Amino acid sequence: MSQEIKTAVEKMNQELLDGQNAYYSGNPIMSDAQYDTLEGQLSAIVTKNPQYSNIATTLLRVGVEANSVLRIPHAKPMLSIENYYTEESFVKAIQNYGAIVLVEPKRDGCSCELTYIDGKLLRAVSRGDGNSGEDQTAQVKVCKKIPQKIKTHIHDLRIRGEIVMCNSELTRINSLVSEKTYANSRNLVAGTLKQKDLTIVKSREISLIPWDVYSPEEDNLLPDSAYDRMQLVSTFGFSQYEGEKIHRQNSVDIIQSLHKILAQNELSDITADGVVVKTDSYRLREKLGVGTKFSKFQHCFKPQNMVATTTLLGIEYGLGRTGKVTPVALLKPVDLGGAMIGRASVCNETYMETLDLTIGCEVELVRSGDVIPYIVKVTKKGTKKFVFPTHCPSCKSLLAFDPTSEIVQRMCVNSNCAGKAAEQFAYVGKRETLEIDNLGDSMAAELVAQKITTLAGLFTFGNDIAKMPKLLESMFSFRSNVNTLKMVKSLETAKTATWDRWIAALGISFIGHSLGKEISKALKLTSDDMKNLPTLLLKLPALNLDKLGAVKTASIVDWAKDKNNIQFCARLYNAGVRPASLVTKVVGGKMKLSRTKFVMTGELKMGTRKVVAAQLEALGAEELSAVSSACNLLIVGENPGSKLAKAQAKGIKIVDENWVKEQLG
């Protein structure tokens, strides 16, 4: 069954990747509704089977640029906007957005960031994956409606917006061609921005509708109010800002503005696919921060509710890696937005009781965005009430209540719980965590069967097998010794993964990769700090990090004070875990490798490419994705690829791992 689920996840993820590639190249192969439905189905499967989340890459990515060669990093993340599909959820989600919010149309175009240096357009970069994008400077510079010069006192000014085309312009262009016509203006814009023939780009009326402006170095010279910033941008020659400024407390005004903009969207010559609400204060935006895929200070309403009614057959209780027990409703399959739905979220025990769920009751489902459908109400009562389990579904130990949760949340606190361990191993094996080869759900189950139930135990086991490989044959009964040895080899590399990955792997509630990076930099963690990590974490409350609220800080402190975790970190250190530091190293008043732009090829013995890249970037170097004129260094490992020949042809300096070790000291 597990192989069938894995195959299904791989197939759905590939379909979504194909859809993304087609969408971003301007030739979509599926509608937005079809894409959302497929993404929701994939998300539902991964929610139940998190061991496959490393395969479902589309759930973590912002976008894709399949044809990009030169990637340019963004000064700050340029992420997607999370969608909401009901007015109630749209209004409710702004409770942390401060006293004033902006409500504006969401134009359906191609997101782009323009960089103006001393008022002159220097560069245009697509959104890409949110961290870096494709260079579109040549195409944007010939667009007559996009200002090439602006009057500003700020040296480096970034303007973000949507590159769009009027539907009337689409009609005009389609009338000039006899063969292929374009389905919509967004597709035509995407295709135009990839045109190498700039005369074609110049002949089309393309403009940019701004929705953000900032300065990487002088943001304090701009108003704190986003509304005031957008008024300023309008004086640069861009279109007048379309949004409205509203006091958050007045939900009636927000709903009225929502309806007003939706009506305007219907009449506009520029396509819009929703309405966005966002925080007005930039100081508050920085405090709210960003997630993996979405920014946390804005969201979008898309008027395409999907509602269905069906029968509740039962409740299944899942166990997460942190011990949280989560109920999932088992339903009589029903068509919801073009997909057959047989499972739905009921969130938690409190929500179950609030809804008064019973076996056989009739429930109303809503699918809102790209998450698993959820039950919103009971339309007809059933026969028998559900009783939430009091013991862990895996290890059968008595469940405890999470004291930090305002709702009733039961937790398995058994540190040796096999169910938790299996989920934890599958999580740390993921590419974005510790990237351990062959550590999936089946290997995790085998490890647990051998009484290996902690991360420290896993690395100790890896050390033992690395020293005496024949132990696998004499002491353990793994289905595949070959795969196990590959995992052991990968464990050795994982010992030096960067600190942000290791902090995410430790299993501290609410703490993932993004916060792991913030924490490791704030504490200036070095490769020797695993042994005393709990003591160092206790210093965090005094540092008052913006992205660490009271709940997350309390979670870290509780974890750091636990004697089991103190011993756990000591065992990891004794097993040889030495995470790579993310602390920027300055030598003689400047970063040692500030002018180095490097590319890597081949297999490196000293660690994965990501680990080595992070260590070099801490010295000021910049990693590039391809050998180009911007590259001035190629780092070569074993079995190098075609990049070596390209670098030799271009006369680029070529070094091996010894050079890297010398730079890192």
Image (tube, rainbow, N blue to C red):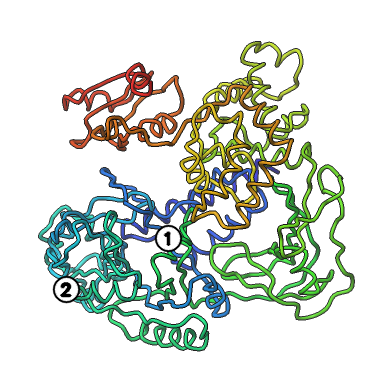
Q: Position of residue 541 (x, y in %)?
A: 57, 50
Which of 182 and 318 lies nearest the eye of the viewer? 318
The answer to whether residue 112 shows anywhere in this view is no
Q: Secondary structure at mark 2?
A: loop
Q: Nearer the viewer, mark 1 or mark 2?
A: 1
Categorize mark 2 by other alpha carbons within 10 Å: few (<14), some (14-19), many (20+). Answer: some
Instruction: Tell me where residue 116 sits by quadrant.
Output: bottom left
Drawn side of residue 63 relative to residue 626, left or right: right
Residue 214: x and y in percent read 29, 62
> How many other residues sit within 10 Å of disc 1, few (<14), some (14-19) or many (≥20)?
few
Q: Nearer the viewer, residue 182 or 180?
A: 182
Q: Is residue 404 left or right of residue 585?
A: right
Picture layout, residue 255 above or below residue 113: below
Q: Residue at x 74, y 33 (%)?
A: 453
Instruction: Please report whichever mark, 1 or 2, sits nearer to the chain's N-terminal start.
Output: 2
Amino acid of disc 1: Glu
In the picture of the structure, the residue carrying the numbered disc 2 is 237
Q: Is residue 91 visible?
A: yes
Quadrant housing the N terminus: top right
Q: Secondary structure at mark 1?
A: helix
Where residue 77 sits, quadrant-wise, is bottom left
| Left or right: 215 in relation to 420 | left
- What amino acid type should be assigned to the residue bearing mark 2? Gly
Q: Quadrant of the C terminus?
A: top left
Measured from the top left, where is residue 90 in percent x and y? 53, 75
Residue 286's mark?
Answer: 1
Residue at 55% across, 30% down:
529
Task: Reply above or below: 492 against 2.
Answer: above
Instruction: Find residue 397 and report its horizontal and vertical position in percent.
Output: 86, 45
Q: Quick one: 648 or 279, which is closer to the camera?
A: 279
